[in-house]
Amino acid sequence: MPDSNFARALDDAQIEKFIADGFVRIDKAFPHRLADEARAILWRDTGCDPEVPATWTRPVIRLWDYAQEPFRLAANTPVLHKAFDCLVGAGRWLPRSSLGSFPVRFPSPDDPGDAGWHIDASFAGPDGDAGDYMSWRANLHSRGRALLMLFLFSDVGENDAPTRIRIGSHLDIAKRLAPAGEAGLSLRELAATGFAESEHRPVALATGAAGTVYLCHPFLVHAAQPHRGTRPRFMAQPPLLPKMSLSLSRDDGDYSPVERAILRGLGR
């Protein structure tokens, strides 16, 4: 692997973009060959033939946790580890051994049924049904999630069902979560407004070549969309798990960009 692709961290401008916009895009975050190897595994598990579109009969097929070598290596490149240090703080995150679930999206005129605006909740409530994801919660300290990550395992253009991102919406969600304390709010409670507090935000599309990774603030409002292209889209959307809780009152003032963004959302 060429060292030039894997020896850099985020610069000051990229970190400021993350704080203000809620995400940063990293091109060539992992090698294209790993994307090809991983995609071959995923194609097999879809039960579809990559050369026969007639077998692509559903708008989305959800595949679950993948820890084979191509996925594990893609999640742990030096450039990504350095970026995690930049955004979350060195020693404050846990390396991933897998890449979680893959919603594989196929060209289709049908509604995929999962294209609503949302944030990814990160912990189960004390009395909730762990199998009912709408009962999962988020709180101001983002318990259980340091980052939302979008790993592109296929080339994704504007027609290929790129994830929609409301730029700066993480600031709105910080304000929304603040009064809820440590218990936070369930996804059902957050969705009760239709995420109207962020509907004024401009929208970006998570496009890019295979090997691109978007590192997103855990409060970023985002959504899927129908696939209007010609080739299926393969993307993983795992969390980066925290090694320790976020802090919004550090004595040494050594706030990570994730924490600084929350403080900015609160007007501090």
Image (spheres, rainbow, N blue to C red):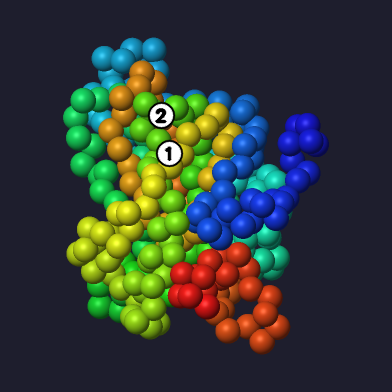
Name which residue lies at 43% across and 39% down.
Answer: 205
Name which residue lies at 44% across and 33% down.
Answer: 234
Task: Give the SS element for disc 1.
Answer: strand
The image's mark for residue 34 is: none
Q: Earlier in the sequence, mark 1 or mark 2?
A: 2
The residue that label 2 is drawn on is 158
Q: Nearer the viewer, residue 232 or 86?
A: 86
Name which residue lies at 46% across and 39% down.
Answer: 206
Against 81, residue 244 (above or below) is below
Picture coordinates of residue 26, whole percent (x, y): 61, 42
Name which residue lies at 30% across and 54% down.
Answer: 199
Callout 2: few (<14), some (14-19), or many (20+) C-alpha neighbours within 10 Å?
some
Mark 1–mark 2 Cα distance, whole angstroms, equals: 7 Å
Residue 164 in the figure: left or right of residue 217: left
Q: Nearer the viewer, residue 67 or 85?
A: 85
Residue 141 in the figure: left or right of residue 106: right
Against 158, residue 220 (above or below) is below
Residue 135 in the figure: left or right of residue 141: left
The image's mark for residue 205 is: 1
Picture coordinates of residue 171, whole percent (x, y): 44, 65
Q: Nearer the viewer, residue 110 or 104?
A: 110
- Mark 1 near mark 2, Cβ–Cβ under 8 Å? yes
Instruction: Tell me the quarter of the image containing the N terminus.
Output: top right
Picture coordinates of residue 203, whole percent (x, y): 39, 44
Residue type at mark 2? Answer: Glu
Report which quarter residue 121 is drawn in. Answer: bottom left
Residue type at mark 1? Answer: Leu
- Can residue 118 be seen in the rendering of this structure? no
